Amino acid sequence: MEKPQHTQAQLRESNLALVLSQLRIRSPLSRAQLAKQTHLNKSTISNLTGELLALGLLHEVGLDTSGGGRPARLLAINPHAGHVVACELGVDFLLTIVTDFGGSILWRTRLATEPTHAQDVILAQLLASVREAIAFSRQSQQRLLGIGVTLPGMVDVEDGVLLFSPNLQWHNVPLRQMLEEQLNLPVYVENDANAAALGEHFFGGAGRVRDFIFILVDVGLGGGLFLNGDLYRGTRGLAGEIGHMELGRYSDRPCRCGKRGCWEMEVNKTSIVNRVRTLLDVRRSSSIPAMMAERDCPLTLALILEAAAAGDGVALEALTETGRVLGLGISNLINTFNPELIVLGGVLSQVGEYMLPAIRETLAQKALLAAHEQTEVALSVFGTDAIVIGAATLVVKAVLSNPKSVEYLPHAVSLASLAFSQEGGDRSADSNAVLLTRY
């Protein structure tokens, strides 16, 4: 059977994406260097870069004088190509940022959400937060490239639907459709750990790594599997739910997914707090009770981290034990996937330094020697922003894959598209909720 031929337009779009891909990895490059890297002739490169410059996706950043002849102009991806709105919808908070095309954060807002509130109420808060971010971007007259949203759960990326979130207890939420209808901008929806893995690859410490796993710990535990140079999604896009591996006899705690003994129940932030409580019940030589009494506050992860930094034995013991359980699960991942790198993010970005020794000790005991010796374990360079940077990366990746798409984006979003009230303020959360109830 004869293979279908690409049209000239498709070939050009593919070549535009190829040029951007090379510049993302090796920037800055001259046109001659681009021709060598892409195996395209110099005339084609000249035309492609001219188009990308006109689209505002590239800019010239100086001269290359290393060749000894006439200096060549160097090109790089333009961080001012547009703005990106990115949202991390967590179990009990909502973080929204605006970044430039290079991933630098220009604006942020974070608000607490109540997990017991109705889905419509939380989605209304999300919509209001996005509108606030768009309003900020509109002030600079930058075009908006799109909106990236991450959620804790199983996501149908192609349709932008949250299929199921055990920790939110949400089912079949058509989030992309809901937001695109309200905002008239492209929306990309992804699982939080997958997005964090993409962000680490695009803008973080895994840029040149072909095989790594991003492990995200917060209320739950998820994994982004970046294998053979790309995100591995599985048959239906649901790969990476590593938090629901069973630890056998180690744990019999019920999980919100409906099973018992899931890995995430032994390493999430609640488990750390519970370990400290257990240790305090049997050993009082700790500064933590005095800290709680002095501040009249409950036991929190932030307080445990503060105590650990001061050398408190109970805090350090609880974190060490959590590190051992993390190492147990990670050893299974190393034996299965043989990654070059394991990146720890979420809560682990805050307490990971206290867990890493125990993690590495456990890997030495449990992982296959030939595999774990080649695997580095590191904390995410983005700390607690890893997921939301990943949300922004969804938009950046989409533009790099289809550069011509920016031709159809408005240079600045109008007031009308933000659906402001006649008084000039944002719609209230209640009003936003009405817009979402039909879903």
Image (cartoon, rainbow, N blue to C red):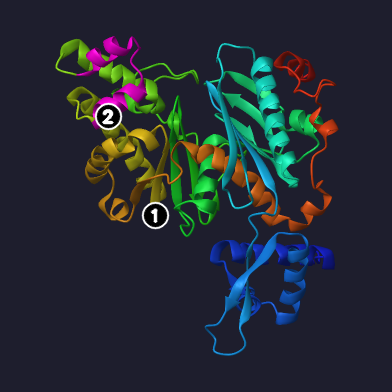
Identify the disc placed on residue 340.
Answer: 1
* Quadrant location, the N terminus: bottom right
Question: Secondary structure of the magenta portion, mostly?
Answer: helix
Tell me where residue 38 sits by quadrant: bottom right
Tell me where residue 331 sits by quadrant: top left
Q: How many labels were placed on the picture?
A: 2
Tell me where residue 52 sits by quadrant: bottom right
Q: Can you give x and y, in whole percent of width and height, for residue 349 in the image? A: 39, 37
**Image check: 29 left or right of 399?**
left
Q: Residues within 10 Å of mark 2 (few under 14, many from 20)?
A: many
Q: Secondary structure at mark 1?
A: loop
* Quadrant location, the C terminus: top right
In the rendered image, residue 204 lying in the magenta stretch gets the answer: no
The region drawn magenta spans 287-309
What type is the residue that disc 2 sits on?
A: Leu
Tell which circle, 1 or 2, labels the residue nearer the N-terminal end.
2
* Circle nearer the viewer, 1 or 2: 2
| Res 411 visible | yes
Q: Secondary structure at mark 2?
A: helix
Q: Can you give x and y, in whole percent of width and height, for residue 434 in the image? A: 78, 15
What type is the residue that disc 1 sits on?
A: Glu
Task: Please give the residue where the numbered disc 2 appears in the rendered image.
Answer: 319
Is 395 in front, or is 39?
395
Is 317 in front, or is 310?
310
Residue in view at x 83 percent, y 50 percent: 408
